[in-house]
Image (cartoon, grey):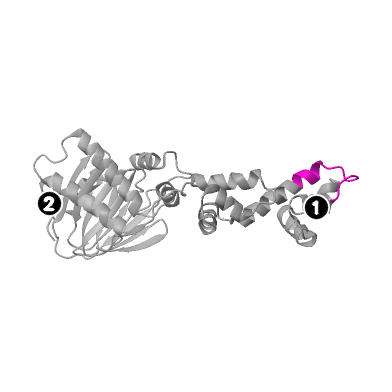
């Protein structure tokens, strides 16, 4: 595996204590212990940051156990470039390899074992910045605090897209003068954070999907048909009449109601007539009015079927409404 961020070397030493101190300066204090007390292997730690985002390459060579303090103020996405790591975080155990990145819970304890030959590319993002990015994408605060899943499948299209952006940033950082312009840096920060929120399952995934794919607007012609039904429900109106009035075929009208209103023109007409009957019965004098008379005036010819539909809709019989 070709080493990344080679121009930003922070540690190149077999001294684990030195490595622990230097890595802790970038991330947080932690315990670092070799799993096997063999020949010391050089630790390589390269790191670069811009704004709220940082990229790091870290390889311990030999197997090590790492127990950091809770991260609290930042989020890590740990991407194995080779080898494997076992990550225990927030009651979840993740076996992380080049197909699966780990995303430790920043509020929970963290216990990791990196096997020999495990090289990782680590993306560090300030938690407040990620929260602000989610706010921008939703256009409002999320309904609950952001919580990321402990792992992400790097083979999904969204994850591959995010990894491509990470690789672009890494390439620019490794190149001469990359990401020096403040406007470019701000744009890359938002792109990285936005794509991460699309790639990693989290507590606001459903809210983001609703924003990205809102319910389709109801076409004006369907709204006109609905208004026609509501305004003329007492008249001897048919679905054919409504379709002709708005310039649609009966089939197109039915399909439009199904797709956009989740009902049918016939059901909408019946509901409008039932609502009209209810209003009239509630206002009527029971000594001068009968249920059968009002039902017939609204187009219900079969009193028994009408009574069943009325009770299903309003939870009471039409005579109960009339007696008020």
Which sits in the foreground, 164 or 92? 164
Give coordinates of residue 86: x percent, y percent. 31, 63
Q: Nearer the viewer, mark 1 or mark 2?
A: 1
Quarter of the rendering containing residue 90? bottom left
Report the disc number at residue 304. Answer: none
- Left or right: residue 280 compared with residue 171: right
Q: Does residue 136 belong to the magenta stretch?
A: no
- State the extent of the magenta-drawn residues as a range: 278-290
Quarter of the picture containing the N terminus is bottom left
Residue 217 appears in view: yes
Helix, strand or loop at disc 2? Answer: strand
| Count of numbered tags | 2
CB-based contact (under 8 Å), mark 1 and mark 2: no
Which sits in the foreground, 199 or 129? 199
Circle 1 residue? 318
Which numbered disc, 1 or 2, marks the residue that appears first in the sequence? Answer: 2
What is the crowding at mark 1: few (fewer than 14 residues within 10 Å), some, or many (at least 20)? many
Circle 2 residue? 12
Outermost residue, top side = 182
On screen, 99 above or below 55? below
Give coordinates of residue 243: x percent, y percent. 56, 52
Q: Does residue 288 belong to the magenta stretch?
A: yes
Helix, strand or loop at disc 1? Answer: helix
Task: Look at 75% across and 61% down and name the residue there.
Answer: 305
- Left or right: residue 250 compared with residue 47: right
What is the crowding at mark 2: few (fewer than 14 residues within 10 Å), some, or many (at least 20)? some
Which sits in the foreground, 224 or 238? 238
Outermost residue, left side = 176
Give coordinates of residue 209: x percent, y percent. 41, 51
- Left or right: residue 261 compared with residue 196: right
Work out how far the residue at label 1 is from the one at label 2, CA to CA, in angstroms.
85 Å
């Amino acid at each position: 595996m070709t080493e990344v961020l080679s121009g930003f070397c922070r540690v190149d030493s077999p001294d684990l204590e030195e490595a622990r101190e230097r890595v802790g300066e970038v991330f947080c204090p932690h315990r670092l212990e070799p799993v096997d007390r063999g020949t010391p292997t050089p630790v390589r730690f390269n790191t670069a940051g811009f704004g709220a985002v940082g990229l790091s390459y870290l390889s311990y060579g030999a197997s090590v156990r790492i127990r950091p303090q809770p991260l609290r103020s930042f989020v890590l996405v740990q991407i194995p470039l080779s080898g494997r790591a076992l990550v225990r975080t927030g009651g979840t155990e993740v076996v992380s390899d080049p197909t699966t990145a780990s995303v430790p819970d920043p509020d929970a304890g963290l216990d990791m074992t990196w096997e020999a030959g495990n090289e990782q590319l680590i993306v560090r993002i300030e938690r407040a910045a990620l929260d602000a990015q989610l706010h921008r994408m939703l256009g409002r605060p999320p309904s609950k605090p952001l919580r990321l899943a402990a792992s992400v499948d790097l083979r999904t299209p969204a994850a591959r897209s995010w990894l491509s952006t990470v690789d672009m940033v890494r390439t620019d950082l490794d190149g001469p003068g990359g990401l020096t312009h403040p406007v470019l840096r701000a744009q890359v920060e938002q792109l990285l954070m936005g794509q991460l929120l699309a790639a990693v399952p989290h507590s606001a995934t459903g809210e983001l999907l609703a924003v990205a794919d809102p319910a389709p607007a109801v076409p004006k012609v369907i709204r006109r048909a609905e208004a026609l039904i509501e305004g003329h429900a007492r008249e001897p109106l048919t679905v054919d009449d409504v379709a002709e009035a708005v310039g649609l075929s009966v089939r197109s009208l039915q399909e439009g109601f199904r797709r956009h209103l989740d009902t049918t023109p016939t059901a909408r007409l019946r509901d409008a007539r039932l609502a009209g009957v209810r209003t009239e019965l509630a206002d009527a004098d029971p000594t001068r009015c009968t249920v059968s008379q009002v039902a017939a005036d609204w187009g219900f010819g079969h009193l028994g079927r009408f009574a069943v539909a009325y009770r299903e809709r309003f939870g009471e019989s039409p005579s109960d409404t009339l007696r008020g």
